[in-house]
Image (cartoon, rainbow, N blue to C red):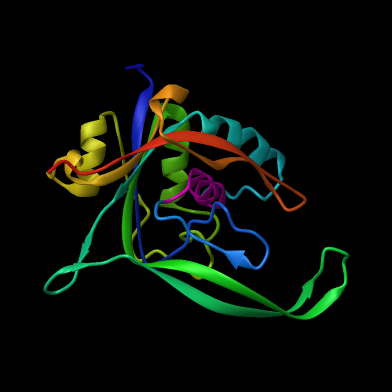
């Protein structure tokens, strides 16, 4: 392991979450796990980087080098584990612009959200970069939300920065073995993965929003 490698643990909890990766036009879907582009967006907001700014364009390529692991953490009610469900909202917005620049009276969209979900995210890589992100998440310059502005975190997003992967996992799941959770893991080599998502952010600029594929695999709990 590199002497400068560190591990940043993030906690994503809230009544609603939405992690879009294949949304088109009037339908805004959500995946079942946090996307890397959404985590990059959270970090940019904490750092105060505007969409399409020079600061963003310098930050996103370095963020893309970080390895990300997402962990689905079951939530418990008073008597049993809460199932994660997709909620679809019939959403209307007035006075929006069309592609031609005209004002549209009412625009209708269908937007999906996850309810009763909780995730842990582990970012690993350059220690200086992760230290900068951790400091920003501790005192964010702008608001932080879980995919959309309606999705407000119910707990601090920053769980901690450590020099050990095992210690980072403990911040998120306690002493439970990581093998008992569903998780989504970045892979270094294409052949190691089983799926690809177009969620590595290149630019969040309004006129130049771009993403590249991320190769990953999903690991199921061991019984």
Decide if residue 129 is on the left or right side of residue 5: right
Relative vertical location of residue 95 with respect to residue 7 in this rendering, above or below: below
Pick the front one: 102 or 4 = 102
Which residue is drawn at the image coordinates 14% and 74% (left, top)?
A: 78
Instruction: Quadrant for residue 189, please give it.
Output: top left
Which residue is drawn at the image coordinates 48% and 60% (left, top)?
A: 30
Relative vertical location of residue 146 with respect to residue 134 in this rendering, above or below: below
In magenta stretch: residue 212: no
In magenta stretch: residue 40: yes
- Res. 151 in view: no
Q: How many marks?
A: 0
Residue 122 position in % (x across, y down): 35, 40
Which residue is drawn at the image coordinates 64% and 59% (left, top)?
A: 24
Pick the front one: 145 or 26 = 26
Residue 107 position in % (x across, y down): 71, 77
Q: Quadrant of the N terminus?
A: top left
Relative vertical location of residue 169 with respect to residue 107 in this rendering, above or below: above
The magenta segment is 34-45
- Res. 207 in view: yes
Decide if residue 33 is on the left or right side of residue 183: right
Question: Magenta region's main secondary structure?
Answer: helix
Extreme residue toward the top, this view: 2
Decide if residue 19 is on the left or right side of residue 33: right
Residue 18 position in % (x across, y down): 47, 61
Decide if residue 1 is on the left or right side of residue 21: left
């Amino acid at each position: 392991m590199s002497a400068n490698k560190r591990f940043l643990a993030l906690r994503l909890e809230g009544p609603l979450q939405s992690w879009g990766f294949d949304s088109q036009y009037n339908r805004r879907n959500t995946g079942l796990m946090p996307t890397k582009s959404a985590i990059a967006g959270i970090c940019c907001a904490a750092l105060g980087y505007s969409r399409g700014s020079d600061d963003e364009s310098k930050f996103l390529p370095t963020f893309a080098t970080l390895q990300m692991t997402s962990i689905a953490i079951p939530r418990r009610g008073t008597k049993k584990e809460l199932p994660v469900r997709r909620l679809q909202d019939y959403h209307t917005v007035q006075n929006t612009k069309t592609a031609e620049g005209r004002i549209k009276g009412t625009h209708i969209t269908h937007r999906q959200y996850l309810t009763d979900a909780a995730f842990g995210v582990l970012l690993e890589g350059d220690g200086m970069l992760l230290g900068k992100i951790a400091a920003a998440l501790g005192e964010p310059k702008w608001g932080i939300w879980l995919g959309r502005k309606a999705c407000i975190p119910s707990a601090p997003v920053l769980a901690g920065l450590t020099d050990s992967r095992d210690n980072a996992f403990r911040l998120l799941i306690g002493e439970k073995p990581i093998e008992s959770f569903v998780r989504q893991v970045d892979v270094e080599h294409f052949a190691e993965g089983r799926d690809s998502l177009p969620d590595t952010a290149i630019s969040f600029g309004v006129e130049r929003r771009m993403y590249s594929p991320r190769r990953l695999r999903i690991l199921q709990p061991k019984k």
